[in-house]
Amino acid sequence: MVRKQQLYAVIVIGAQNIFMQIVDLASAQIVESVRYDIDLGEDVFSEKQIHSQTVNEIYEALQAIIGLLKDYQIKNYRCYATHSFHEAENAEYVREQLYERTGFEIHWSSESQEALYRNLATYTYMPDFSDVIEKNAILLDISSGSVALTAYKKGKFMFSKNLKLGPLRVYEVMRDVKDAVPNYVEVLKDYVASSLVDFIRLLPDASEIHNVILMGSAMSVFEPMTENSAHTLKFSIKEFDAIYSEVVHGNDQFVVKKYNVDRSDVPQVLPVMILVNQLLKSFDIQTLWVTALKLIDGMTASVLQNKQDLDISLNQKQQILTSARNIAKRYHVEEKHQDFVIKYSLQLFDRLKKLHGMGAKERLILELAAVLDDVGSYINNHNHYAHSDYIIQNSEIIGLSNVDLKMVAAVARYHSSHTPSSELKRFRDLPIDQRMIIAKLAAILRLADALDASRQQKIKAIRVSLKSTTQLVIQATANDDIELERWIFKKKGEFFESVFGVQPILKGRVKL
């Protein structure tokens, strides 16, 4: 019996290309993969605007994609624009123009989300990936506008950081310098090295990193090498050094002829090679791995795993939580209290599901807020919730959209009883349903935080029961007196009652 295809398309608008992959959900196979060149990056990185000519380029590419969707009779698809697109000051106007002209609803993707999907691409499609990261590695994803560096230690994700070091962006920024100084290569080296300082500083045991994995849509001289290879390419440091020397000392004509680089991409070659070289020099790197995998490969891998939705898998969730815990460690959050609040906020969430009606995504937002709600104490314990809000919104948590990050920050901010409920109006730019989620999660987090008001983890277990439609009783078993917890719980419970219409009551007994 012939299995009927279930076709789904993923479209990604990047700085220099529009990619589309058509996947068969039934067989978990990629049916078609296409790529169209555009000049969006040149507009955005130099002038912060998307010009009408570029809009027409994007429109023509999307029209070709519409033709393919019709040929394959595909009705289920999703279109994304990378962070480079929405850096433009007129990004929202252009998105609306393209919607009116093509019918495509374009969804924004954040740098943190993109980093997560690139990681998924390597997990899914790179044959040697598990072995490579077991020996400690840095995944270096190079797109036109930015570079995502992800560190792995003993096979586990450590952290990820995005840098505005994409080769097209660097070329646009340094264009005037190139014409003005005689030693452009040395200036470019200094510029790249200075941008890598923070990443290297945050990476513990830098000397133990032995592998670098290179991937992305702007890999310079390496991209033609991978086009005809179904496998990952492996370079020794000596082999890379030979290529690097040729590129740095060769002219544009030599690079085009020797490495089959498109002439229009030649200005991006030097920034890429210097970036990789600086990274290799910073660590005791033994091997450079090069793969043709790109962002869209991670997105389609997620679709195949989750059948149409870019949901978060268990492995991705662990990376997100690890990213948040690393931020908490950086700001010296007290771990025992943190673990207590995480444990009981999730217990309350799970046991009150009928009351709040939220799902897995909201549970993750609550967990992240519980991990990070006290980071602001590093700045000042007074009004620490406001400092937590600021730190979270200005941190990188891999896998989160900009809206998700804002929601985590808001839930963390409102975990304190000192924050007036009326301040939720400051999030008027969020839809009412998202503001309600913030309120519900903050109300739950307040109760969990109150259960450890003394910071001594006296409570060892809780039982949760809705005694009536207006009363929630939490029966706590403790190893010491919990009068402080009762008092704080009553104060923080007022917000819970306002949100849910249910009065929370803490009862307890000491069990020695």
Image (cartoon, rainbow, N blue to C red):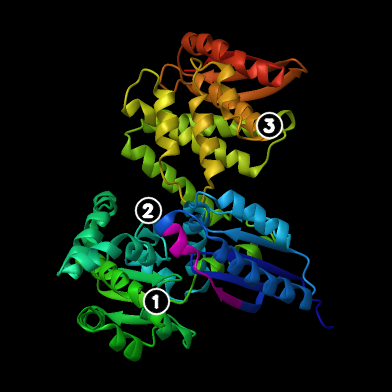
Q: Residue furthest bottom?
A: 257
Residue 38 is covered by the magenta coloring:
yes
Viewer-proximal residue, 463 or 316?
316
Q: Position of residue 329 (x, y in %)?
A: 34, 39
Q: Earlier in the sequence, mark 1 or mark 3?
A: 1
Q: Which residue is mark 3?
A: 432
Is 144 placed above or below 403 here?
below
The nearer-to-camera label among 2 and 1 is 1
Asked if residue 473 shows in the view, the reply is no
Graded by Cα atoms within 10 Å as few (under 14), some (14 to 19) or many (20 or more), the crowding at tag 3 reads: few
In space, the residues marked 1 and 3 are separated at their CA atoms by 46 Å
* Image side of residue 182 versus residue 405, left or right: left
Task: Specify the quadrant of the image occupied by residue 97.
Answer: bottom right
Looking at the rendering, in which quadrant would you find the N terminus?
Answer: bottom right
Label 3: which secondary element: helix
Mark 1 or mark 3, which is nearer to you?
1
**Mark positioned earlier in the residue sequence (3 or 2):** 2
Which element carries disc 2, helix, strand or loop? strand
Question: Mark 2 highlights which residue?
Answer: 161
Relative depth, front residue between 454 and 54: 54
Residue 272 against residue 255 in the figure, above or below: above
The residue located at (71%, 17%) in the rendering is: 502
> Measured from the top left, where is residue 269 in percent x and y?
33, 75
Q: Position of residue 406 (x, y in %)?
A: 52, 37
Q: Which residues are magenta?
A: 34-45
- The circle drawn on residue 126 is none
Q: Residue furthest left?
A: 182
Give the number of the disc on residue 265: 1
- Which residue appears at 64% of the width and 71% of the height? 60
